[in-house]
Image: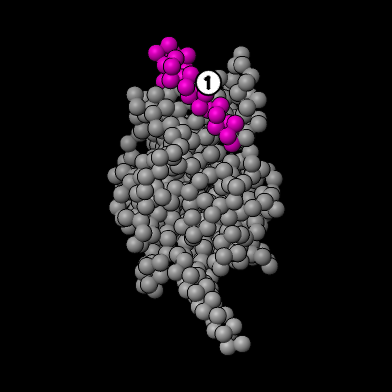
Amino acid sequence: MKAILLSALIFCSISLSAQTNSPNIIFIISDDHAYQAISAYGNKFMSTPNIDRIAHDGVLLTNNCVGNSLCGPSRATLLTGKFSHKNGYALNGREPFDVTQFVFPQLLQQNGYQTAWIGKMHLNSLPNGFDYLKILNGQGTYYNPQFISKTDTAQYHGYVTDLISGFFFDWLKNRDEHKPFFAVVGEKATHREWLPDIQDLGAYDDIDFPLPESFFDNYDTRLAAKDQDMTIDKTMRLKEDLKVHQGFGQGAGYDEYSRMDEAQKKAFKDYYGKITKEFDEKKLSGKDLVKWKYERYLKDYYATAKSMDRNIGKILDYLDSTGLSKNTVVIYASDQGFYMGEHGWFDKRFIYDESLKTAFMIKYPGVIQPGWKLDSLVSNIDWAPTVLDIAGLKAPAEVQGRSFYPLLKKEAVADWPDAEYYHYYEYPQPHHVSPHFGIRTKNYMLVRFYKGVNSWELFDLKKDPEELTNVYGNSAYKSIQGSLVEKLKGLIIKYDDKEALELFNTPVK
C-alpha cells in the first residue's frame, strides 16, 4: 500500500512539475493594425515602443500572411488552424462560428492549461476551449462597451483598451498559480472609425504624413483594383470616419456616441469642433481635399493605436514585475494587414501585400534568440499548431497549418513551404472587392478574380514591390507564369478548396 501511495505521489509531483515548467502563453491580437504602422517594421513618423519591446526581446516575422484578410475569418483561422473554406467562417459576422469543431485551446485545456479570451472575438458565438470569456459584443464600441461572459452581458464605463487590460489583469491575478495559462487579449484597436482615448486626441496633429508613392494610383492593368469601393477619396466619410460636423449623440444616430457620458462627449466636441472649424475655413476640393482626409485618417488611426501600445506596455511591465516574464511566451499579431493610403485606399481584403501580410512577433526568454527577423513565408493557419508545439503538444490531422516553432529556434526545415495560399469571399458589400484566390511566393504573386471581375493577375515583386503592373500574359513571364499556375492548383488540391478548383478549371472569358 505504501509503495502504491509513494508511486502516486511521485507521479503527481512529476505531473505538477511538468505543468509548472510548461510556458504560459499570451496571444495579443489587434484589429486592422497595419505592419507598416509599427515602428519595429520601419515606421519613422510615429512610435510603438511597447510593441517593439516584444520584437526586441524576440523575433519579428516579415512575411506572415493571412488566408482571408477579414476580421472574423482571421480569428476563426487562429482558433482552428484551418482556412475559411474548412472552418466555415468565410464572411464577416454573417453566420455564427461552428462551435462543434476543434479549436486548439481545447487541447491546451486537456493538458492542464487555464484558458481565457478577453476582448474582441467577433465570431457570433462562444467557442469551446475557454475556461473564461469576457468578449466584446460584436465589433464592440470604443467607449463604454458591452462585454459578454458565460453568464451575462453587461456594459462597462471607460475606454475599451483600458477595460480589456483591466479584465485581463483581474483574470490573471485570480487564476490557479499552479497551472500554466493561455490567454488571448483581443484588442479592438485599430478598427474603423478610429476613436482615440481622450488623453490621445491630437497626439499626432503636429506631424505632416507624406503621401505613399502609390496614393494616386490609376490602377492601369488591374481590373479589380479599379472596381472597388475603399478609397480615401470617395469612400472615407467626413462625418462618420473623420468626425467633421459629427453631432456626437445629437441626432447622430450612432451607437458609439450615444454610449458616451457627458464628459466624453464634451472632449470629443471640443477637439473635433476645432478640426471642423479649420476644415470649413479651408474650403478644400479636389486633391487638396483628398490629402486632408488622408492626414486626418492617419492622425486618428495612430492616436487610437497609442492607447493600445500603452496598455501592451502595462502587460509587459506586469509580467516583468511578477517574474512571470521568465516563463511566458508573448505574441503580438494583427488579424490582417491594412492600407495606410497605399493605392489611395484604407481597409484590407485584397491579396496585395499591405493587407495580405500582417504583423507578428514573439518572445520566449531563454528559448527564442532575441532581436532578429524571420523572413520565411508563414500563414495564420500556422499560428495554432505553433502555439500547441510551444506547449509541447501536437496538432490533430484536421489542422491545415504546420508549426513554425523550429524556425523560431533557428532550426533548419528543408521542406518549409515556398508559397502561401489565399482566398477572399465577401462580395459585394462592403467595399465591393471582387472575390479571389491566389498564392504569394517570395518573388511573385498570382491571383484569380472570379466575381464582379473575371481576370488573372501576376506581379513580379522584385521589380514591382508595390504591385502596380500586372504582367499576366506577358511573354517574358511565360515560364514563371506556368509554374505558378501549377503551384496554385497544387495548393488548391492540397487544402481541398473545392470552389476554387472548380473556378480554376473555368476559363476566363
| Residue 158 percent location from the top left of the image | 52, 64
Q: Residue at x 39, y 47 (%)?
A: 407
What is the count of numbered marks? 1
Q: Which residues are magenta?
A: 467-495
| Residue 284 percent location from the top left of the image | 41, 32
Q: Dividing the image into 4 quarters, which one contains the C terminus? A: top right
Vertical side of 54 occupied by 487: above or below: above
| Residue 133 percent location from the top left of the image | 60, 63
Question: In the image, is 349 to the left or to the right of 377?
Answer: right
Circle 1 — which element? strand
Give amino acid for label 1. Answer: Trp
Residue 169 in view (yes/no) = no
Question: In the image, is 128 to the left or to the right of 54?
Answer: right
Q: Does the segment drawn in magenta span residue 489?
A: yes
Q: Which residue is mark 1?
A: 456
Query: Closer to the camera, 50 or 195?
Result: 50
Residue 340 in view (yes/no) = yes
Question: In the image, is 278 to the left or to the right of 109?
Answer: left
Q: Residues within 10 Å of mark 1 (few under 14, many from 20)?
A: many
